[in-house]
Image (cartoon, helix red, strand yellow):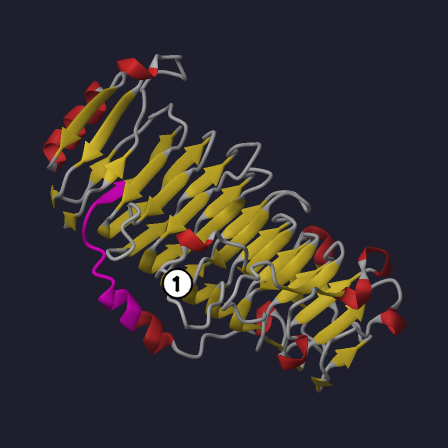
Amino acid sequence: MRLFSVAVLVCALAVFQKVNALDQKVVQVSNSTELRLAVRSAKPNTKILLKPGEYEGGLFFENIKGGGSCLQFSEAAYLEIHNLVLVGARYNGLNIDDGGSFDTPTHHIKLVGITVRDIGPQGNCDGIKLSGVTDFQVENCVIERWGDGGQGIDMVGCHNGTIANCILRFEDDKGQGIVAKGGSTNIRIVCCRLEHAGGRAIQLGGSTGLQFFRPPLQPGQSHAEARNLTVEGCTIIGSTGAIAFVGVENATVRFNTIYRPKRWAIRILQETREEGFIQCCNGVFTDNLIVFRSDEWAEGGVNIGPFTAPHTFTFARNWWFCIDKPEQSRPRLPAPEKDGVYGVDPKLRAPEEGDLTVLPDSPARKVGAHAYSPKDQDEKEQAAKEGKTCGLVLKRSSIC
């Protein structure tokens, strides 16, 4: 595998010693042998930089501690990272970016089985941060407790990616769970479970400084925080708002289960209002199961902000059930819903134990996360073939 200016921040094999920044030692490596030696020899305040070169797979590191962020990779290509545990970073747990060179994005990245927890805790600190990354997969990862102003998974200017089978846990009103913004396109969030994963469990779009959009904004063109995003087969428990459409165009949310959001099931917002940005529009919300309580329900479950186009949204076949007052199950949607169901008990299997599937005799068997079935398995397999994920593989390590 060839890496382009990949930077790994591995600071200290000792425990969080205070060392003057002027004493920092920088070690550059260009192959697997040099990398192994550098990691074994690292002292407090050591930075290891991976130069472009050929790195064999099968690398294994353990008990690496220290540093403001756990790991950072810049301008990388064909990179796999497996089964790392990243704990206690002051800033970001895992940071993968394009090095600020927007014309050469980091590409073909696969993250599998990563655990990130206890990041921050104050400020805009992310569990996994991806900036300027294309053709990527994040699978079977667990992110718990990130910065109170940060995100569990934050994507800025990312394209052609999948977040699948991940678990995120935090508190209902701190930060956000999964976010795609900054010009992000063609991203699928599939079969994830979000438990009290911030004020906005899944945010489609957002608010990004104009200089951080990837690709850069071009005068005379229409702009959006994100386009062509899909959320399907996910389970969302709690959070102030379950799904937030924020300056996004053409986002689809289908076959998800939303359980007891603390204020809203849906938010439609526009936070980036500079010239050339279109209003939040053309969202699709179908085949979802929404179960809530009346004392945790505001504005009919839907919050609509100014400078949006809520009338362009499509609603169909959603199942709405108010636990304590079934007669108040109908939401206040901004556009007519086709074939919606209101006030009929979906017969969840064991919600108090976290099991939000439905009983065999449930009338809601055809909606919600339990009803999701991938319709394009061939597409998924083809994406895996094209990923070429055969390069640097970091496995089974506890870092920071």
Magenta residues (range): 382-394
> Was residue 308 drawn as part of the magenta stretch in this picture?
no
Mark 1 surroundings: few (<14), some (14-19) or many (≥20) residues within 10 A: some
Does residue 307 appear in the picture of this structure? yes
**Residue 65 vs residue 357: left or right?**
left
**Residue 373 vs residue 54: left or right?**
right
Q: Pick the quarter of the image with the C terminus.
A: top left
Up the image or down, 362 lies above or below 100; here it is below
Camera-side residue: 97 or 253?
A: 97
Residue 75 in the image, given as x and y percentages of width and height: 24, 48
Tell me the residue that label 1 is attached to.
Answer: 217
Q: Residue furthest bottom?
A: 338
Camera-side residue: 276 or 288?
A: 276
Residue 99 in the image, given as x and y percentages of width and height: 29, 45
Up the image or down, 285 lies above or below 123; here it is below
Task: Identify the secondary structure beneath mark 1.
Answer: loop
Up the image or down, 62 lies above or below 113; here it is above
Name the residue rendered at 29%, 42% in the picture.
Answer: 73
Camera-side residue: 168 or 370?
A: 168
Name the residue rendered at 26%, 26% in the picture.
Answer: 47
Does residue 54 appear in the picture of this structure? no
Say how many tags the image has.
Answer: 1
> Was residue 386 drawn as part of the magenta stretch in this picture?
yes
**Residue 308 vs residue 44: left or right?**
right
The quarter of the picture where residue 292 lies is bottom right
Q: Amino acid type of disc 1?
A: Leu
Residue 171 in the image, given as x and y percentages of width and height: 65, 43
Name the residue rendered at 20%, 19% in the picture.
Answer: 41
Name the residue rendered at 37%, 31% in the picture.
Answer: 398
Residue 155 in the image, given as x and y percentages of width and height: 44, 54
